[in-house]
Image: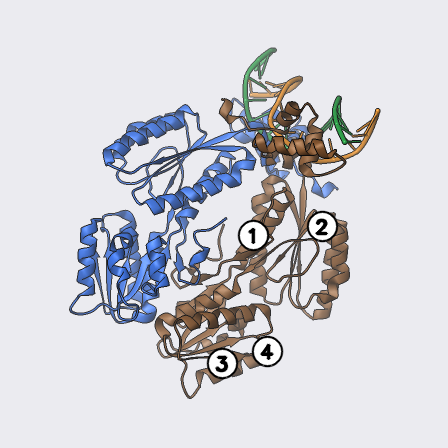
Chain colours: A brown, B blue, C green, D orange
Amino acid sequence: LEQNKRTTMYDIAEKLGISVVTVHRALHNTGRISPETKKKVLETAEEMNFQINRNAQALRRSAVRIGVILCCPIEQFCHEIERGVRAAFSDLEPYNVVHDIHILPYTKAENCQDEVRAAIDALIDNSCNAAVVFLSGPTDCFTDSFEKLENAGIPVATVVNYIPLKNLVVHVSADGYCAGRMAAELLSISCSGQRIAILTGSNSTYIHSQNLNGFLDESKKSPFGSVDVWEHYDDSRLVNEKLEAILNSEEPYQGLYITSASVINAFERLSKLSPNKAPKLVTTDLFEENRYLLKKGIACATIFQDPYKQGKTAVNRIYRHLCGEQLPDRLLIPPQIMLCSNMDYYPAAE
Amino acid sequence: LEQNKRTTMYDIAEKLGISVVTVHRALHNTGRISPETKKKVLETAEEMNFQINRNAQALRRSAVRIGVILCCPIEQFCHEIERGVRAAFSDLEPYNVVHDIHILPYTKAENCQDEVRAAIDALIDNSCNAAVVFLSGPTDCFTDSFEKLENAGIPVATVVNYIPLKNLVVHVSADGYCAGRMAAELLSISCSGQRIAILTGSNSTYIHSQNLNGFLDESKKSPFGSVDVWEHYDDSRLVNEKLEAILNSEEPYQGLYITSASVINAFERLSKLSPNKAPKLVTTDLFEENRYLLKKGIACATIFQDPYKQGKTAVNRIYRHLCGEQLPDRLLIPPQIMLCSNMDYYPAAE
DNA sequence: CTGAAAGCGCTTACAG
DNA sequence: CTGAAAGCGCTTACAG
């Protein structure tokens, strides 16, 4: 049937009396081409409602290689990112996409530096068509390696932590501000007008400050009696010290919001709490520890930032970029509220 | 580089000294082929880790036409399903997929019957390669039309409501049982040991009974003082009558769970409630009415069943089925908890 | 600045 | 039961 017929590059070429190669050059803005020809092609493409056939495109261009570098101190978190990344590649496998995954052990910071550099070199040597990068901690020390990536013309997607790169195509992360607001709103259901404690890393860490700002802004809407912020600077001893202080406060807290992965460090103490007497507890992410606390009724909810989806989305986006799609350069993954009754759906199986 | 090379059907053919056509027949279980040849091909494919190149496959087979029939009395809900369906098609457009969408006005039941039959005929006449179907109400009257679909060999995906069809490939729906559990768990945070009312359609409707069973099962874990079920049989006058009775109950209710779309009918009354005095309210889905109630603090949460995602997933699944992927025949979309602070993320923009 | 030709890996008639 | 040939719509050298 006629209606099944889509416009192809041949149709455009025929209409203008030029070759398909010229059409290709006009559409992809590549090689030398006269401005008038280009203009005519683009107009005609628009007019004939041309949409490139990605099957043909991907078939011709043959295998696409995407490199991935993950380096993160929180093992469970890193593992979920990796699972998401692998799931994306598994979906893309039939489309002739190959991958090059480097999971770097996060031991001493110095060790890691060498390995990050080596991994970046490997991506370039293997002539990857694109890269997905997740690095923890400061990245100033990698400027030389990043420059190599840029010079090799390899487009990059960052996950979780933003890195300012010239060839950055998209940054995928959780919406930490929204997560903080959700925690506050959730606690406000049962703790309106009461005393709240927040146990957090440090206000100078981007994601923690986002959580905190979200929480405080939301608190203005339906005020608590007070909101006290306890920082532990990601020091596991301080985590437990501050937690103890919160639990033994003379004026007791009715609600407690724990940001970041510090639940892992605080787990032993938290697991001994009794569900009915302890403050209403809202945690962050979905580590094994949080699952246990939810099942026991010690935590009433956790704000899940879906690292699986972050990893999966990053790979997907960079692939679609390689296909020529125009997409936004920033993508926020909405946090989700996990209770006991829905947590088995996450992390996603598919 | 050698490592970039994937096994193709030619590689298998060459290895076995047969033609690529025979390999194709073996892999797709089509046409006449000797059992030994077939066995050898399948073994070799496995051994050489053959994965079909879907780009080449889709390119050769040219345009795929997917038909969609939606018929539902709740306009906002139907609209979201449609948006999801269109989003899926928009993603698939570069892959040479065309669509045939029939949104049927849900007026009198009899009217709708004719239109459903006409739409099914249209799908067959246009030689659609697959269909996505969402029908409300009883479907016994359509057996003749369904048979035509079956005889035409058109694979079908159902959304929201299950229909028993021989050519059903996948059914996509929300997990209503989980939604009910989530509502109970959410209310248990602030209403443990207190009196709860559930306003629901009818226990004989599948989705309502799922919500209810989930709620009651979850209640066993952390018991409420009592849980009373009020049925309104989807009669808008009864909705308001029962709601009034709940709100004016001599022994007041501290929590209220409203299943299904009855919030739309109950909206006028609900919107007049004062946030602090009314029972803690948990609603279902994310209609304009729910958004308003969340913003005003009248509802504390709503359990979102993501019709957008249901529609989108259904189209995606049936397409992947056409590509030859083996996928589960049932897909439950996990419900999500919407508060004021995260509702702007839904329905998904992308 | 432009074009002719080959080929990516499949599937679909058609012939035997 | 099996195979030779054409072609889906692009992109990539190569030649001019």
Q: Confirm whether residue A287 shows in the render.
A: no
Badge 1 element: helix
The disc label shown at residue A154, or none: 2
Q: Residues within 10 Å of mark 3 (few under 14, many from 20)?
A: many
Q: Residue at x 64, y 65 (%)?
A: A136
* Furthest residue in direction front, as rendered: A36
**Chain to which mark 1 belongs:** A
Badge 4 element: loop
Q: Residue at x 48, y 43 (%)?
A: B87
Among numbered discs 2 and 4, the one appearing first in the sequence: 2
Residue located beneath label 1 in the image: A313
Tell me the CA gap for discs 1 and 2. Answer: 18 Å
**Chain to which mark 2 belongs:** A
Tell me the CA gap for discs 1 and 3. Answer: 35 Å
Image vertical order of residue B37 relative to residue A61, above or below? above
Q: Mark 2 or 3, which is nearer the eye?
A: 2
Among numbered discs 1 and 2, the one appearing first in the sequence: 2
* Drawn side of residue B152 relative to residue A349, left or right: left
